Amino acid sequence: MDLNKLDDRLLSLAEKAKQTFWGYLGCELVSMDAHKVVVSLEVEEHHLNLIGIMHGGVHTSLLDSAMGLVAMAARPNEDMVTSNLNIHFTAPAVKGKVTAIAEIVHMSGKMITTQGTLINEQGTLCSMATASFRVIETKHK
């Protein structure tokens, strides 16, 4: 895909995302291309669970969003939905910045498989995931 078109799409997606669950969580897109997406989140009090660590749902939402974006970047003219997501929590995340990195693992006609990692500011792996996305329709240009 032409880098300028990807940049335009990125700006459009970022603007739309502000009004969705993505914006509610506070996600920020750091970088994006057709093979890799980097997303960050400043973990605040409302992202924590009752024992003071980042809620597992926030881990999952952040990784699902990042992996979904890389799938969308790889196939920009098609809509898709998460069909499977598997996550492993490896270390607690606390207040501060976390970064999700998502990459394409495999693509076929109607499926895209991705992997993602979530690290804290110290570089500790906090969670990792794989996800499959099902292409559901082709957008009309």
Image: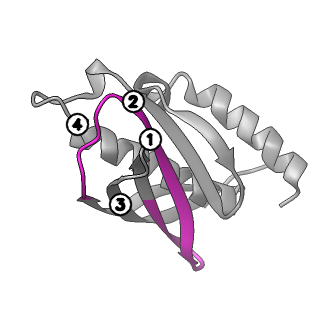
- Picture residue at 36% right of the left edge, 62% below the top: 129
Residue under the image location 49 percent in, 67 percent down: 114
- The residue beneath circle 2 is 96
Residue 91 among those drawn in magenta? yes
Q: What label does residue 48 carry, if any? A: none
Q: Secondary structure at mark 3?
A: strand
- Tag in front: 1 or 4: 1
Mark 4–mark 2 Cα distance, whole angstroms, equals 14 Å
Total number of numbered labels?
Answer: 4
Say what secondary structure mark 4 lies in. Answer: loop
Q: CB of mark 2 within 8 Å of CB of mark 1?
A: yes
Residue under numbered circle 1:
121
The answer to whether residue 79 is seen in the rendering is: yes
Q: Residues within 10 Å of mark 2 (few under 14, many from 20)?
A: few
User: Sequence order check: which comes first, mark 3 or mark 1?
Assistant: 1
| Amino acid identity at mark 1 | Glu
